[in-house]
Amino acid sequence: MGWRIVSTLTSGRISGVDIFVMHLTEELRRRGHDARILLTRAGKEEVDAMPLPTSAPVDSLPPAWRRKRRHRRHALREYLVSLGECIYMPNYDFCHSPISARLPATVRTVGILHSDDAMHYDHVRQLGRFWNRIVTVSQRIAETCRAIDVPADKLLTIPYGIPVPSEPRSVVREPRDPIQVIYVGRLEQTQKRVLDMVAIMDRLADRGIPFRMT
């Protein structure tokens, strides 16, 4: 077996990071690593709860999520230390990741900046010096990290966007067939710019272009 790798999530909810962690864990296991997901707030009711994978181990912290934060952090540290040599990836679990500063050398921490969002930059400012590696998912995020003095020797950029064709796919449609506009994501402006959909629909309506929004 290869490395023991622990990716933390809070309680399992619909988000790009959760989906990424599930796919990554499955792929790491396929490559021979002992990869698993750890829920740090298991049992917390989420309005956007998502089924967890059955193809990879999913553990949870022993103390219920209602216990005090310091107790949960202590439980996470004890869990990681008990694994011996391992890799810890806190992802967006900002509440528990400060244990990075108190982990022994047997636990290596890999922080991932999943988006160009202020909370991820705050995360790396506070804890980046304790992480062994810092992964950014775009070159833009890497450049911002360098600008805020994140150690360059720890940075590694691994894009996980989707491939975009160099030319748009040719679609044959009748002149009055409505354009299909589909939005997939949380109804949030700061990260998702969902209100841009309003401007898009206004422009289509102004130009007399029929469309269907989903």
Image: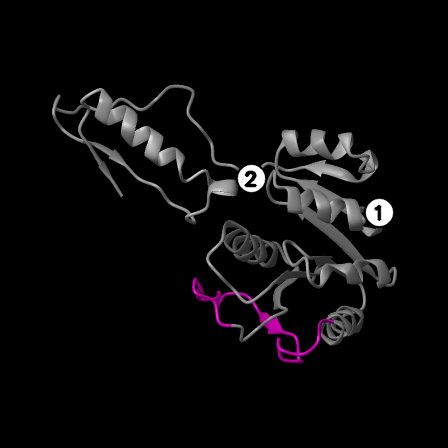
The numbered mark at residue 91 is none
Question: Does the segment drawn in magenta span residue 114?
Answer: no
Magenta-drawn stretch contains 55: yes
In the depicted view, which residue is nearer to us: 32 or 158? 158
Which residue lies at the image location 72% right of the left edge and 37% below the top edge?
156
Which secondary structure is most common in the magenta stretch?
loop
Tell me which corner region of the image, top left, top right, bottom left or bottom right, holds residue 149.
top right
Position of residue 52 in the picture relative to residue 41 (left or right): left
- The N terminus, quarter of image: bottom right
Q: Which residue is mark 2?
A: 160
Q: Residue at x 74, y 76 (%)?
A: 71
**Residue 63 at x, y = what percent?**
67, 80
Q: How is the image coloured?
A: one colour
Amino acid carrying mark 1 in the image:
Arg
Residue 80: quadrant of the picture:
bottom right
Q: Are marks 2 and 1 in contact (CB under 8 Å)?
A: no
28, 75: nearer the viewer:
75
State whether residue 102 is above or below residue 199.
Answer: below
Q: Please provide percent x and percent y for residue 129.
A: 84, 47
- Callout 2: few (<14), some (14-19), or many (20+) C-alpha neighbours within 10 Å? few
Q: Which residue is mark 1?
A: 129
Instruction: Give how far across and how far down residue 32 sits, in percent.
Output: 64, 58
Report the quarter where the C terminus lies. Answer: top left
Magenta residue span: 45-69
| Position in image of residue 137 (x %, y %) | 62, 38
Q: Is residue 212 above or below residue 84?
A: above
Q: Mark 2 falls on what kind of element? A: loop
Which residue is rendered at x = 40% and y = 38% of the image?
A: 195
